[in-house]
Image: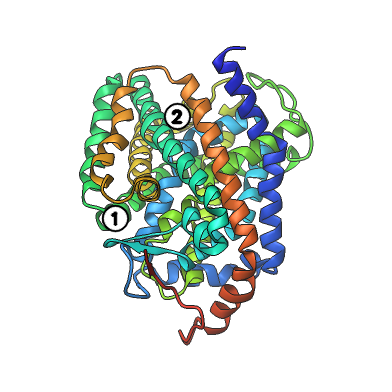
Amino acid sequence: MTLEGILNWITGVLWGPPMMVFILAAGLYFTIGSKFFQIRKFGLIFKETLGKIGFSHGEEGSMTPFQATAAGIGAVVGAGNIAGVAVAITFGGPGAIFWMWITAILGMVVKTVEVSIGIHYRTRIGNTVYGGPMHFISKGLGPKWEWLSILYSICLFLGVLMTSTLVQPHTMGVAMKTMFNIHPLITVSFGVIVTGITIIGGFSVIGRVSEKLTPIMGLVYIVGALIVIGMNAKNIPSSFGLIFSHALSPTPAMGGFAGAAVAYTLRQGIARGLFSNEAGLGTAALIHSTARTDHPVRQGLWGAFEAFFDTIIICSITALVILSTGMWTSGLTGAELTMASLESTLGIIGRYVVGFGILTFVISTMISYYVCFETAVTKLFGTKLIFPMKFVFLAPALIFATRPTPVIWLFTDIFVGILAVPNLIGLLLLSPVFFKKLLPDFLENYKSGNFRYPARIDKS
């Protein structure tokens, strides 16, 4: 068997039904254990996030709550929100979007838990605050679980290199070449320069850049997409009809669409939903642990908002653009399908909307994921290698800018998939901390601020 064949087999096993069931079961466990917190307290989530967007609770940390959220959204809102949704519809049919919504609803509480636990066990190393699975596994579960913490750190280190600084920039370069005939090395070099200047400034600069870049990139894409949806408003009811009617029934072949069985619709929706909002991978805990907040759950609410915005808002808008224009049966897929859908209504402007979206989404992903990368570096190598590792972080983007990366995609799926296992094991074992201490403490005292378990930062 070839290397690619072996990797395909591993990926199929890792991202097969058992892993999806495991992640969804964890989401159900946290949903039931929190008494359907993300639904019961839906209004509170938005009141304490968007309603207090300019507030910063607490003094210690590298970013404000909104900056951490902007960085978190920047990490998860990548090329996948433009291309991934199109792939889900192409291979799973419109019903796949319904299952993306289900994963997002469960993902809201998973992200609340992992961000809350991450902040509860975060630590200060030198002048920088770090948190995430490697820290809450080590501190919360004790020395006998250190091997799991190291495993997570290794997979995170390799996964970030392959995902955010190899595959994502490569995808950006190819897209710009296809749409505007710009050489991939030019596009990727631009992304590397912007990212390099930002990450050299540290986490606080990453936060300041993210809070400005994320709203702009989101606004441009959302406005462009909403114009298309508005101009095809008569097709919106039927688009929702397609989503709901084919969630549990096969989608027949039509036009360039090959058809989809229910099982594949479900698999595509769940897989793309998980890839989209990253609930269960621990990346949210890594980024949000840098926030200045007075209580772990207060920042955890931003994690819930992040999952909602990424999948329920951005992914749904992309889906409605594709379905309402009727382009989903064209036989196209990926970013090409999204671009064709926008162009069918906006003309050449649609191409620029997609181009701007991919360019800014990928750059924001690279910038935000550096927080995850540095956290892994400090765990594995200490603080002395932080500066030279910034160049290691950026190098893959330039090296592979013009090279095909089919095998790298498979390696990426493997390392990213492995991240979910130690993170969810840690969260499940530490769930009593959330259910019995952090959540009730916040709900009882968030108005007064007199918490029994306030956010703290231990020194390493």
Q: In the rendered image, which residue does mark 2 sit on?
A: 339
In the shown orientation, is residue 100 left or right of residue 334? right
In the shown orientation, is residue 104 left or right of residue 47? right
In the shown orientation, is residue 434 left or right of residue 253? left
Going by the picture, which residue comes out furthest to the top? 1
- The residue lying at 26 percent from left, 23 percent from top is 185
Q: x%, y% of residue 30?
A: 66, 61
Amino acid marked by disc 2: Met
Out of 156 and 198, give the one closest to the viewer.
156
Q: In the rendered image, which residue does mark 1 sit on?
A: 203
Q: x%, y% of residue 44?
A: 54, 72
| Vertical order, 36 against 307 (above or below) | below
Q: x%, y% of residue 458?
A: 39, 69
| Vertical order, 118 against 84 (above or below) | below
Quadrant the C terminus occupies:
bottom left
- The residue lying at 59 percent from left, 43 percent from top is 273
Indicate the secondary structure of the residue bearing disc 1. helix
Quadrant the N terminus occupies:
top right
In the shown orientation, is residue 51 left or right of residue 422? left
Viewer can see residue 242: no
Rendered image quadrant of residue 354: top left
Amino acid marked by disc 1: Phe
Spatial CA span between label 1 and label 2: 34 Å
Indicate the secondary structure of the residue bearing disc 2. helix
| Vertical order, 142 against 225 (above or below) | below
- The residue lying at 44 percent from left, 44 percent from top is 77
Mark 2 residue crowding within 10 angstroms, few (<14) / some (14–19) / many (20+)? many
Viewer can see residue 218: yes
Q: Earlier in the sequence, mark 1 or mark 2?
A: 1
Task: Give the label on residue 376, or none.
Answer: none
Q: x%, y% of residue 223?
A: 41, 46
Out of 404 and 209, give the one closest to the viewer.
404
